[in-house]
Image: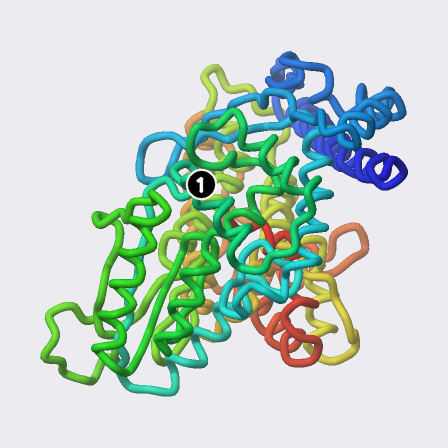
Amino acid sequence: MKDILLQDLIEEASEKARRFHLYHNYQEISYQRNQRRLDNAPDKEIKIPLEWNDDPKHNPFYVLKKKNQIVNSITHKLLNGLYKPNKPFQKEIPKKGGGIRKISIYQIPDAAVSDRFYTNLLAKNRHRFSSLSYAYRNDRNVHFAIQDIAHELKEVPRIYVAEFDFSNFFGSIRHDYIFEQLEENSFLVSDLEKQVIEAFLKDFQVGIPLGTSISLFIANLICWKLDRRFEDEGVRFARYADDTIVWSKDYNQIVKAFDIITSFSKETGIEINYNKSDGISILQREELKSEFLATKRYIEFLGYKISTKSISIKDSSVHKIKNQISYLLYRNLIQPIATIPFKASNKPANNMDKDFVTAIMQIRRYLYGNMTEVTLKRYISGAYKRLSFKGIMSFYPLINDEEQMKELDRWLVSTIMNVLKKRKRIYLKHIPTFDVNQFPFNCTKDSLIIQCRSMVLRDKKGLVELPSFLRIHQALKIGLKNEGIEKVMNPKSIYYF
């Protein structure tokens, strides 16, 4: 046990240290970029996570230094039934719909213990969970759920669907229900594993902590009976933690599914959020008429929008993507020159706008990860056989709505043009003699695409080519067909929730 926990501790601390180094490097790069762009650039500021000041065992560098002493202590406590995690640091995260969500940030040694016992529990009990439960497992993921749902829905012109949302799922689970499920449903749980679960729940009168791995196993555990009841009723469903959608061709079955959800809510103490739950509706193709008042053309589930014809990125996710790209354009092209007095020192000259080049490369990295346009095109043409997809689009390998991709490409070009026009106006305001007939300020939409594609920078072609949603989608489509979902999806997809 000691050697295993030591390795787990090193991995946990090393990952947190790596993230802090990445953050530090990003701040340094931003500082150097500001030094080149602005006169009197602001000083670099490195913020230390708040929890590091709460206890040194939140600090990965301290933990790596003291790893042997820490592991000896934890191993002794575990073997003697004395283990109890230290009080976690509570961090409040704003919710999208208002209010806050409390995240428990456990000290690194306790996080390593939690992850180890979660891994062991999942390995022994994974086969007990429903194949239609997709969250927090190493044999299922969010994209498997989307693929299964989309396949079912495209087979029929109309179908009944039931969508439910729970209020405070993690924070309101009754503890007695958790331990009832451990005892009743043939889960393989050792006495030590049960003690560890009890230790992590001890400081909570109700609910399970958000922010620790062992809670992920518990989340699936408490829904075991819910999944089984759906299966016994014969309805199709997909569940990702508390996000649940049920569908059936039979209206009576979908009504029974609603009764099952209601019964589950009463047993577990988890209330249904009726204000956010769409309840029962009929999903059908646009050209069909319906006797139902509650009709839908699509459903939204886990970042996707799914209709009987296509899979798209859901509207709120599209909005986030647009916001991030708009921010990158603002951060590079507007913010450095929108100061009074005028501080910009990195002015465009001789058909070269360095800030524009930086903005395009950052947008590409956001969409593609570390791939260049040349690499992407060679993959699409078949010259490259394998790529590692890491950008934001790798969270959406299953979309087949090419019209949405084309629309996003049109939006991107239009937005870049609007930002360039504003950048030109600001320069003319401060420098009346500014040359507006140079690239990229003298471009139309079409000429901007062509000139960016043909521009040679650092003896390389394609560095300034405008990135394309459609192009990365085409590459993902090829990778999906040739290698499967898990080879092309972003590896962080398993942490969706």
The residue labelled by disc 1 is: 176
Residue sitting at x 68%, y 33%: 111
Query: So how many labels did they put on this image?
Result: 1
Inspect this view and state whether residue 420 appears.
no
Above/below status of 35 relative to 150:
above
In-front residue for pair 50/392: 50
Q: Is residue 280 left or right of residue 142?
A: left
| x and y percentages locating residue 298 in the rendered image | 31, 70
Quadrant of res 109: top right
Which amino acid, mark 1? Asp
Q: Quadrant of the N terminus?
A: top right
Residue sitting at x 70%, y 67%: 487
Q: How is the image coloured?
A: rainbow
Above/below status of 57 relative to 246:
above
Q: Is residue 282 left or right of residue 163?
A: left
**Helix, strand or loop for disc 1:** helix
Residue sitting at x 68%, y 24%: 31
Above/below status of 456 relative to 232:
above
Label 1 CA crowd tier, 10 Å (few <14, some 14–19, many 20+)? few
In-front residue for pair 459/296: 296
Q: Is residue 464 left or right of residue 437?
A: right
Q: Is residue 24 left or right of residue 360?
A: right
In-front residue for pair 166/345: 166
In-front residue for pair 160/176: 176
| x and y percentages locating residue 77 in the rendered image | 77, 26
Residue sitting at x 43%, y 73%: 149
Quadrant of res 205: top left
Inspect this view and state whether residue 166 appears.
yes
| x and y percentages locating residue 260 in the rendered image | 30, 62
| x and y percentages locating residue 395 in the rendered image | 56, 59
